[in-house]
């Protein structure tokens, strides 16, 4: 793929009109007020038929899987192994709204991705069909809001080794205890996938089996904090979860099996998908920076001429252009691979995320510098983009973790 098709551009235009009508007028409240993003998210999925499309895709996948037409995992994820133009178009159609929303509210993209993607995907990947019917489908249609809870106060990059949250058998039930932090949608989530260690009373804490449970808002012993104050991504509510002897039955154990989660391998697949999506977010943020900076460079006058005539300003703009070109090529490669029934390898997804995150942060910082004192003011837009960009280097795996995983793949001959 070398450029967007006419159909892609038509969808792009429709999304932009939606953003102009529904997002931009509420941007101040989303960014600095107390307006959760979920009503706007639901308007988006309904306006573009995404909820109904998700429901139809789900029913088709379920019917095919129950007839023995493919493995449950493949059908649950909507495997693209067949490839072809339709598969490529499907990926492109998913990326375009992410790109356009990220120009104004990248946090909303995170909130949607965690709910409709990570949380629903965790249940669809390993859950039973009754679990998928009850909990995953309402997440895929955004009827319910989801949270995927893995991070803890003492376990960031070492998510499993330092994990302290536990599940302990109690007859036919389990007692869940622990604390989670930095949980996207945590304050408002209706459905939570809680990842913890099985306390069997025998194994060393670091070596215990990883299991996951599906929780509902309001369960006894479950406390969801108010939104945490943070540097950026304000349109993505982030909170803490506290579990004190939350008693659950086996029907809430994902897959209804203590072996279903898949441990680190399961998390690796989840992170690979998440990292691929972040490239589209980065592209949207870089595009917005370029739009704001080129217009400002043409209209801002200093020393009797527009600042765009100064070579140092031109250097900043040129670097932004190169960044946009490289990130766009990464996106087009994802689309091309889908057309051939393939996906990015874990190493490539990590490399793309590493480059896109670092480059976007640099572009946004340079945008603030180009605007000078105005860039430090909220009204000019680049200040928000700069704050929002930084977290791309942290969540979904820090830059340092990406570097390590890429190198390990190379040394193992997998890259």
Image (cartoon, rainbow, N blue to C red):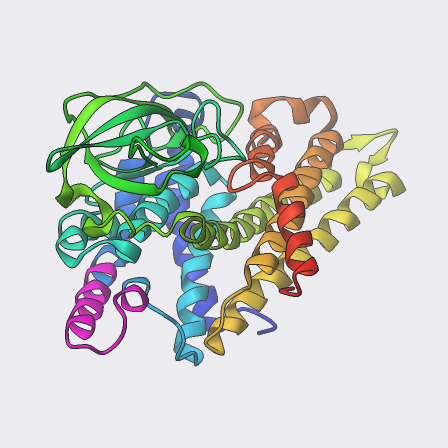
Residue at the (46%, 58%) spot, across then down: 95
Q: Is residue 284 left or right of residue 189?
A: right
Q: Is residue 79 above or below residue 158?
A: below
Q: Nearer the viewer, residue 304 or 72?
A: 72
Visible residue check, residue 365: yes
**Which quadrant holds the C terminus?**
bottom right
At a point 62% along the width and 46% down the height, the residue shown is 402
Residue 137 in the magenta stretch? The answer is no
**Quadrant hosting residue 374:** top right
Residue 212 position within the rendered picture, expressed as x and y whole percent measured from the top left: 29, 41
In the rendering, at what x and y percent does residue 217 appear?
Answer: 19, 30
Quadrant assignment, res 228: top left
Q: Magenta stretch containing residue 63, yes or no? A: yes
In screen coordinates, is 371 left or right of 68? right
Looking at the image, residue 65 lies above or below residue 115: below
In terms of secondary structure, what is the magenta stretch mainly? helix
- The residues colored magenta run 54-75
Coordinates of residue 257 in the picture (x, y in percent):
22, 50
Quarter of the figure that contains the N terminus: bottom right
Q: Is residue 66 above or below residue 288?
A: below
In-image side of 415 versus 308 (left or right): left
Residue 10 in view in this figure: no
Which one is in front, 184 or 124? 124
User: At 38% across and 38% down in the image, what residue appears?
Assistant: 208
Q: Position of residue 307 (x, y in %)?
A: 81, 36
């Amino acid at each position: 793929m070398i450029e967007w098709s006419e159909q892609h551009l038509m969808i792009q235009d429709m999304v932009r009109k939606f953003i102009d009508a529904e997002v931009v007028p509420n941007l101040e409240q989303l960014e600095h007020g107390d307006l959760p993003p979920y009503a706007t998210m639901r308007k988006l999925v309904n306006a573009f038929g995404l909820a109904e499309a998700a429901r139809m895709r789900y029913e088709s996948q379920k019917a095919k899987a129950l007839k023995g037409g493919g493995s449950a995992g493949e059908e649950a994820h909507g495997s693209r192994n067949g490839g072809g133009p339709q598969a490529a178009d499907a990926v492109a159609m998913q990326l375009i709204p992410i790109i356009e929303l990220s120009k104004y509210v990248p946090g909303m993209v995170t909130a949607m991705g965690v709910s409709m993607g990570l949380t629903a995907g965790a249940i669809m990947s390993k859950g039973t069909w009754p679990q998928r019917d009850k909990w995953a489908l309402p997440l895929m249609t955004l009827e319910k809001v989801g949270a995927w809870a893995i991070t803890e106060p003492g376990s960031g990059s070492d998510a499993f080794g330092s994990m302290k949250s536990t599940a302990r058998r109690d007859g036919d039930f389990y007692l869940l205890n622990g604390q989670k932090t930095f949980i996207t949608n945590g304050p408002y989530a209706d459905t939570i996938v809680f990842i913890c260690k099985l306390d069997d009373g025998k194994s060393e804490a670091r070596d215990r089996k990883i299991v996951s449970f599906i929780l509902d808002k309001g369960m006894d012993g479950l406390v969801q904090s108010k939104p945490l104050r943070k540097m950026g991504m304000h349109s993505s509510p982030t909170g803490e979860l506290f579990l004190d002897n939350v008693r659950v039955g086996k029907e809430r154990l994902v897959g209804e099996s203590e072996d279903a989660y898949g441990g680190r391998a399961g998390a690796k697949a989840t992170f690979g998908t998440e990292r691929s999506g972040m490239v589209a977010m980065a592209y949207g943020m870089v595009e917005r920076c370029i739009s704001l900076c080129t217009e400002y460079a043409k209209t801002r006058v200093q020393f009797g001429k527009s600042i765009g005539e100064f070579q140092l300003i031109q250097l900043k703009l040129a670097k932004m252009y190169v960044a946009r070109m490289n990130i766009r090529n990464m996106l087009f490669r994802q689309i091309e691979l889908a057309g051939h029934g393939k996906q990015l390898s874990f190493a490539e997804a990590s490399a793309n995320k590493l480059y896109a995150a670092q480059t976007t942060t640099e572009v946004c910082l340079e945008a603030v510098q180009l605007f000078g004192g105005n860039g430090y003011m909220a009204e000019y837009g680049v200040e928000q983009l700069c704050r929002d960009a930084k977290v791309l280097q942290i969540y979904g795996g820090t830059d340092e973790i990406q570097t390590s995983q890429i190198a390990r793949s190379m040394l193992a001959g997998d890259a």
